Image (cartoon, rainbow, N blue to C red):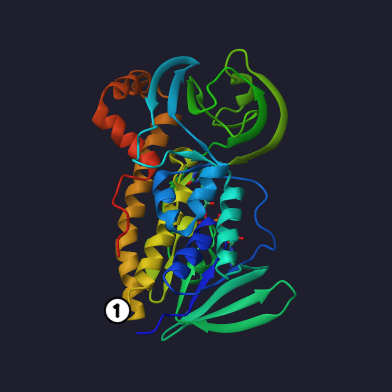
């Protein structure tokens, strides 16, 4: 059977990774993105060992490691009093959790794709018109022209508000937390170890801190005034970027339908505390490419297999991250006690510690295989 013609909707990390993995398996996909420019600010900061492992053969991993910084562990505090610490430096035989801005991860994926002759088309918006023997789409170009096109298959990597998902009327059930989470990338002088991530609990919420480079820290919190809860002796400087977001946990009810598949945030969204969104999207891309290159099946069967394999993975990862976030954010007395003593205890129990770290590392289920 010949290789299918594939359209990828969205050139975020999931779409770019899909184009790259497909190309390396001999399939040249067309990839388009509605936005005229790549995103200027970074959401994801941590690339996990699973992603580094999958991207190794393409050369992207070496570039990520050359630019990124390893994270050696995670320290927990109760009102900045240290209660537990995990070492993460040996979570994988070759790779560590690596801090690299999403903006740079996307740029490196784009560079390597370009070397292979695949160039994302920007300012092109996809909508799905129907599917039977082929997928019919309309591509609206930034200059106002409309292109009607058909493909053997479509990978919807078009983010949390996925047009692909909406056009196919695929439900996206789940729940969201009511509070707003402020985010700051801020210059900071602090004695906190810059090679570790830090989570501090307070009666009203939590604060997550990780160094982006020598001087700039990312602060994410559900406190209304996180900068009033900085560690003792910390001196804040210029705010480089500030934003805020809501946390929701949702999984698309199916992640393939006929000749269309969903990957990344189009298929699942969850709290950033697990550092999994982008990484799980890259894994979706890897799995999608493997299935599309499976010439022993017809095209709808390749899509069906992708959906059957990935949906349970999405459900399990989102459930686990939701559970950890619920425990971390709650301010009930029971949750506070569990946090205070549970985390300290977990720090002493190697198998449980391993499970928690495995979740952050993306090693909580097997890597997709051919
Ligand atoms: C504060 C914060 C911190 C985070 N930290 C981490 C972390 O450390 N590690 C991690 O793994 N994840 C993290 N995440 C999650 C991560 O940012 C997302 O999961 C990731 O961006 C999803 O990638 P994606 O390619 O699936 O979707 P997106 O990045 O949203 O990309 C979708 C693309 O599709 C395009 N598009 C939309 N509609 C259309 C259309 N109709 N036609 C064509 N193109 C379209 C958009 O322009 C966009 O470029 C974090 C998120 C937040 C908010």
Percent position of residue 151, x then y: 49, 81
Residue 316 lies left or right of residue 106; in this view the side is left
In the rendered image, the vertical position of residue 6 relative to residue 339, given as above or below: below
Tell how many labels.
Answer: 1
Q: Is residue 330 above or below residue 323?
A: above
Image quadrant in which the N terminus is located: bottom left
Please give the name of the residue rendered at 69% of the width and 59% of the height, measured from the top-left corner: 37
* Looking at the image, residue 186 lies above or below residue 299: above
Quadrant of residue 34 within the rendered picture:
bottom right
Q: Can you give x and y, in whole percent of width and height, for residue 177 in the image? A: 48, 40
Among the 4 quarters of the image, the one containing residue 356: top left
Quadrant of the snapshot with the C terminus: bottom left
Q: Is residue 252 left or right of residue 127?
A: left
Identified at 49% across, 22% down, the residue is 200
**Residue at image location 38% in from the left, 26% down from the top:** 86
Residue 137 drawn at (x, y percent): 55, 79
């Amino acid at each position: 059977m010949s290789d299918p013609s594939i359209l990828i909707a969205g050139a975020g990390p999931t779409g770019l990774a899909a184009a790259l993995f497909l190309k390396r398996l001999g399939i040249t996909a067309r990839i388009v993105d509605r936005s005229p420019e790549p995103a200027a600010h970074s959401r994801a900061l941590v690339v996990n060992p699973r992603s580094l492992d999958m991207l190794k053969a393409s050369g992207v991993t070496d570039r990520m490691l050359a630019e990124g910084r390893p994270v050696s562990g995670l320290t927990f505090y109760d009102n900045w009093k240290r209660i537990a610490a995990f070492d993460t430096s040996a979570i994988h035989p070759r790779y560590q959790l690596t801090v690299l801005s999403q903006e740079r991860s996307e740029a490196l994926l784009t560079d390597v794709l370009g070397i292979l002759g695949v160039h994302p088309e920007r300012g092109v918006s996809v909508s799905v018109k129907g599917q039977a023997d082929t997928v019919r789409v309309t591509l609206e170009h930034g200059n106002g022209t409309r292109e009607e096109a058909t493909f053997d298959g479509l990978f919807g990597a078009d983010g949390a508000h996925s047009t692909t998902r909406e056009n196919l009327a695929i439900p996206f059930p789940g729940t969201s937390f009511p509070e707003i989470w402020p985010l700051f990338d801020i210059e900071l002088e602090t004695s906190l170890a810059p090679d570790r991530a830090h989570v501090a609990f307070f009666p009203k919420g939590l604060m997550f801190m990780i160094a982006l480079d020598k001087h700039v820290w990312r602060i994410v919190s559900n406190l209304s005034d996180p900068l009033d809860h900085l560690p003792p002796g910390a001196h804040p400087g210029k705010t480089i970027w500030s934003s805020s977001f809501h946390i929701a946990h949702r999984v698309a009810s199916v992640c393939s339908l006929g000749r269309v598949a969903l990957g990344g945030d189009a298929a699942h969204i969850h709290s950033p505390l697990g550092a999994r969104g982008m990484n799980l999207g890259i894994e979706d891309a890897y799995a999608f490419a493997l299935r599309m290159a499976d010439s022993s099946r017809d095209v709808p069967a390749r899509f069906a297999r992708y959906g059957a394999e990935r949906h349970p993975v999405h459900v399990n990862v989102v459930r686990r991250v939701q559970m950890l976030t619920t425990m971390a954010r709650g301010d009930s007395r029971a949750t506070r006690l569990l946090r205070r003593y549970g985390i300290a205890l977990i720090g002493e129990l190697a198998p449980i510690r391993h499970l928690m770290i495995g979740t952050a590392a993306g090693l909580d289920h097997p890597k997709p295989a051919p």
